[in-house]
Every structure is written in structure tokens, then in C-alpha cells.
Amino acid sequence: MTACTPAVPSGEALYAEAESNYLRYRGFVNELQSSLSTQPWRIGQLGSYGMQPSECDGPGTYQFRLDRAVQLDAAQRVEYADTVESFLNDKGMTPSRGTLGSDSQEGQLIQVKVRDEGDFELLLIEIGKTGDVLISARTACWPGDRAELSERLFGGVYLGDGYLPVDTESPTDPLFFGITPGDPQFVRETPSP
């Protein structure tokens, strides 16, 4: 008796499956962000737009990652943690919540996270004492060649090298998948002197 190994998608099938995975995870994260604030959120480190596939669990798999941050009212940080926890519970997840540091009753940092649930390997929400909120998302590993997917998405264009020159985005901005070479997205207009 032989074991059946599922086929690893490639070509158009890889692109279509990755697009579905991407839109689902980004939609979830955007909904989570919106539960806290629809104002623009800072994009994490250069190139961390959330669409670049990363290798995951070795060759033949990929995942998506993103980091977003926003400054909110520090006096409401416990309420923000409650909102996040409630959101994740309503989505059928089992978040864990903890506090790091002991400078005050609420501590320095409140963390709410889920591991290995839904589309996520890790979904971490950190709420700092000063009101900084950071969402870090690492998706589950999906089958498919990361390099092939990256080539199909971007054709050698790097998002951080001018295609997406913005450093913020709102969770209500329309989602898109892939790029159109020569047609930059979200380019900021230079103000007239």
C-alpha cells in the first residue's frame, strides 16, 4: 500500500490558491485592525507589505507575514486588549493573554496571541504602555514553491523599491494581489510648492 501525497500546486493553480489564501488572511487581519482603528497603520520593516511569500518549513512551502502598528489612547489599552480577545473568540479562536513587565498594575505590555489556529501560525497583538499597538501575523505554511510564486506575483519587482512607497495603509483600503509592472500602487503625490 502506498501513501498518497497531495500534489504541490504550481503555475496558475499555485497563483490562484495563493491569492485565495492571501485575501482570506489579509481580510481577517484588516477586520481585526478595524475593530481597533480604521486610521492609517504604519507598515512594518521595509518590504513587510504582507504579500511577499516567505519560505516556511523548508523548500516547497510558503507563508505570508506582516507587521502593522498604530498609536492609540494609552488610557484605553486594557479595553483594546478586551476588544482583540473578544474579536478572536468570536472567530472561533482561543487567544491567550498575558502581561509583561510590572511598572504598574497593567504592566508594560499586554499581549494577546493565537498559535496554529485558522490561517495563522502566529497572530500576535501587543499593546504597549504608551498606546502603541502592534499586530504581527505569520500565516500557516501552504504547499507551493516560494520562488515560483514570488516570480508570478512580482516578476522581479521589489515592493520596497518604489512600487509601494507608502509607509502606512488603512485596514479599509481595497485589497489586491500581485502587481502590474510599470503601474505603481499607492504612490504618494508630491505636494506642490
Image: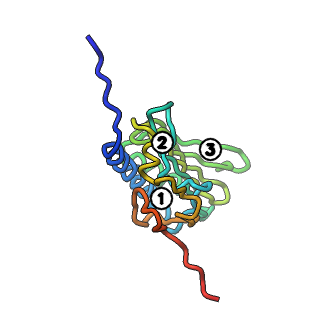
Residue ID at (62%, 58%): 132
- Sequence-earlier tag: 3 or 2: 3
Mark 1 secondary-structure assignment? helix
Q: In the depicted view, which residue is nearer to us: 96 or 144?
A: 144
* Callout in the foreground (1, 2): 2
- Quadrant in which the N terminus appears: top left
Q: Residue 50: x percent and y percent?
A: 49, 52
Q: How is the image coloured?
A: rainbow
**Residue sitting farthest toward the bottom:** 193
Q: Residue 141: x percent and y percent?
A: 44, 36
CA gap, disc 1 and disc 2: 29 Å
191 relative to 156, above or below: below
Give the residue type at disc 1. Gln
Q: Are marks 1 and 2 in contact (CB under 8 Å)?
A: no
Residue under label 1:
33
Q: Residue 176: x percent and y percent?
A: 39, 60
Give the residue type at disc 3. Thr
Residue under label 2:
147
CA gap, disc 1 and disc 3: 20 Å
Q: Are marks 3 and 2 in contact (CB under 8 Å)?
A: no
95 relative to 152, above or below: above
Q: Is residue 109 left or right of residue 56?
A: right
Q: In the depicted view, which residue is nearer to us: 124 or 104?
A: 124
Q: Is residue 38 visible?
A: no
The numbered disc on residue 106 is: none
The numbered disc on residue 99 is: 3
- Quadrant in which the C terminus appears: bottom right
Badge 3 density bin: few <14, some 14–19, many ≥20, Cα 10 Å: some
Mark 3 secondary-structure assignment? strand
Give the quadrant of residue 35: bottom left
